[in-house]
Image: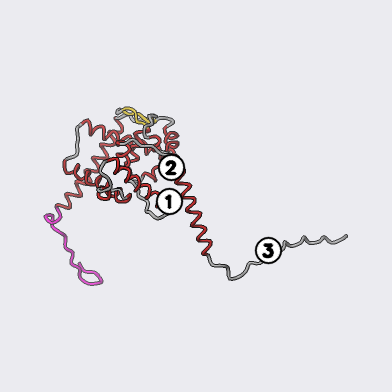
Amino acid sequence: MQTEFGYHIIRRPTFAEVKDEFSKEVNATATQQADSTYLANLERTSDIKIKDDAVGTMRAASKDLDAHAKDDAVLGTSTAGNFTMAKLVHWISAYPQRAQIEHGLAQAPDSQVTGFLKNVMRNELVLHQADSAKVELDSSEMADLHSKFAGLVTAAWEGLNVSPKVLADSGKTASQRERVAAAHVEQYMDGLMTQRARYVDVPIPLKSVVRDKYTWKVNQAGLARALAQATKAHAAADSVKAKNRPASAVPLGPPAAAPSSPQQPKG
């Protein structure tokens, strides 16, 4: 091809060279279309119905989703049965964007909240059908999940300084090792309150498993003590900053007197 800049040679790859990439693109498009058709048919035939008070229930629960982990309030129904607040909390806990979702439930328009609920109910229906068809993960997929979960556990252990390696020689019995581990956690909390330790975020999948497996509760007295310690630490830090702040180079002097009111002319 000739242009004002000279001759240009354009080479078009042969089909043999691009057939794999072409097949991949065609299959991807076909898969997307099939998925869209399947989901549309699933939603149409599953008789999804949203309760009139669902949005209000979700907004109220968004203030503390964990408190509604066993809430049987029905948000909607379908051929798979009742979809409860507890199921919604379970789904939200699986999303990495949990904080954004909580904010959306509280602030987004009703139409968006309803749309989110429908999407989650549709996902529940997909799982229901997969279970009915006995679809299971293969061994390599299960091994990958186990490996990733083990990585979450190890990261939490090391962050809190309670890994088996650290506690290996801390006691002969399980109860002795538990006391040592509790002391490590106590030290970590003290360091966290005084900003000497890094905050360790426990991922939601690990938190869900631990909460389901073990008995737990929030110690309100412990929270009050931690808040008091944090307040004291912040006050001490502020005091040190004020003490070390350099004095002003220009004395402020006494405050200026307020201007007197203008006298009214005598008539």
Residue drawn at x 34%, y 44% as measured from the top left: 182
How crowded is the residue under tag 3: few (<14 C-alpha within 10 Å), some, or many (20+)?
few
In this picture, residue 249 sits left or right of residue 208 = right
Can residue 152 be seen in the rendering of this structure? no
Residue at numbered disc 3: 255
Q: Point out the stretch of residues depicted in magenta.
A: 1-19
In what element is the residue under mark 1?
helix
* Front disc: 1 or 3: 1
Residue at numbered disc 2: 222
Q: Is residue 139 magenta?
A: no
Residue 141 image offset from top left, x and y in percent: 19, 43
What number is the disc on residue 193? 1
* Front disc: 2 or 3: 2
Q: Amino acid at mark 2?
A: Gly
Residue 14 image offset from top left, x and y in percent: 13, 57
Precedes in sequence: disc 1 or disc 2 = 1
Q: Are marks 1 and 3 in contact (CB under 8 Å)?
A: no
Residue drawn at x 17%, y 53% as measured from the top left: 21
Q: CA distance from mark 2 to mark 3?
A: 47 Å
Relative to 11, does residue 219 appear above or below in the rendering? above
In what element is the residue under mark 3?
loop
Residue drawn at x 47%, y 46% as measured from the top left: 227
Relative to 113, does residue 48 appear above or below in the rendering? above
Q: Amino acid at mark 1?
A: Met
How crowded is the residue under tag 1: few (<14 C-alpha within 10 Å), some, or many (20+)?
many
In this picture, residue 12 sits left or right of residue 52 = left
Q: Is residue 17 magenta?
A: yes
Precedes in sequence: disc 1 or disc 3 = 1
Q: CA distance from mark 1 to mark 2?
A: 13 Å
In this view, the residue in front, 257 or 63, is 257
Q: CA distance from mark 1 to mark 3?
A: 40 Å
Q: Amino acid at mark 3?
A: Pro
